Image (spheres, rainbow, N blue to C red):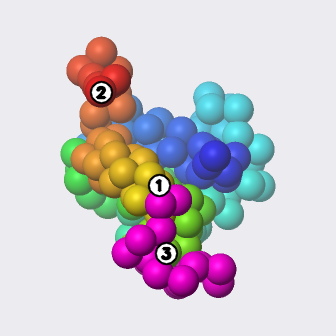
Amino acid sequence: MISQKAKYALRALVALARAGRGQSRMIGEISRDQAIPKKFLEQILLELKRAGIVTSRRGRMGGYELVRAPEEIMYGEVLRLIDGPIAPLPCLSKIAYRKCEDCKDEGSCEIRHVFERVTLATRAVLDRTSLADSLNLEDISVDAA
């Protein structure tokens, strides 16, 4: 499961995507509209800012806005930033690979083979779904294959 922090980060980013290109939103607005505790949201936005996903401006017309277009910000990128690896097993992680301690041979591990399929399918969805895609829920197809 994704963490509450990751859900809040995604909700805040979707709110910024809805605001439109070049438009900023104040932390208080996002906090109120998305029911995210303000102090927690501040920490999340700072983390997203350090990663180059959002930027901030001070002053009356200030607030936070997306650095890149919503079409360029993928769910997988945000989840890895906030929660770390997406893979259910350490031997399947792209960013934090390590061999399972109790594994004799990854090539013949039945558990790894099954979860590799799950991981690849999950990555395919998360790494191809952008903030812009999530604004058009009816356009996101779920393949039950």
Relative to the observer, which residue lies in front, 53 or 142?
142
N-terminal-most mark, 3 or 2: 3
Question: Callout 1, which amino acid?
Answer: Phe
Question: Callout 2, which amino acid?
Answer: Ala
Q: Residue at x 57, y 79 (%)?
A: 103
Task: Work out whether residue 54 can be spotted.
Answer: no
Task: State the CA–CA distance, disc 3 to disc 2.
Answer: 25 Å
Label 2 environment density (alpha carbons within 10 Å; few <14, some 14–19, many ≥20): few
When the figure is inspected, residue 134 is found, relative to residue 90, above or below; the finding is: above
Task: Work out whether residue 141 can be spotted.
Answer: yes
When the figure is inspected, residue 1 is found, relative to residue 45, above or below; the finding is: above
Task: State the CA–CA distance, disc 2 to disc 1.
Answer: 16 Å
Q: Position of residue 72 (x, y in %)?
A: 23, 53
Magenta segment includes 45 = no
Q: Position of residue 96 (x, y in %)?
A: 50, 80
Label 1 environment density (alpha carbons within 10 Å; few <14, some 14–19, many ≥20): some
* Residues at discs 1 and 3 in contact (Cβ within 8 Å): no
Relative to the observer, which residue lies in front, 133 or 44?
133
Query: Helix, strand or loop at disc 1?
Result: helix
Q: Residue at x 37, y 75 (%)?
A: 107
- Residue furthest out toward the top: 138
Q: In the rendered image, which residue does mark 3 sit on?
A: 91
When the figure is inspected, residue 104 is found, relative to residue 26, above or below; the finding is: below
When the figure is inspected, residue 36 is found, relative to residue 60, above or below; the finding is: above
Query: Helix, strand or loop at disc 3?
Result: helix
Q: In the rendered image, which residue does mark 2 sit on?
A: 145
N-terminal-most mark, 2 or 1: 1
Screen quadrant of the C terminus: top left
In this rendering, would 33 be left or right of 106? right
Q: In the rendered image, which residue does mark 1 sit on?
A: 115
Bounds of the magenta segment: 95-111
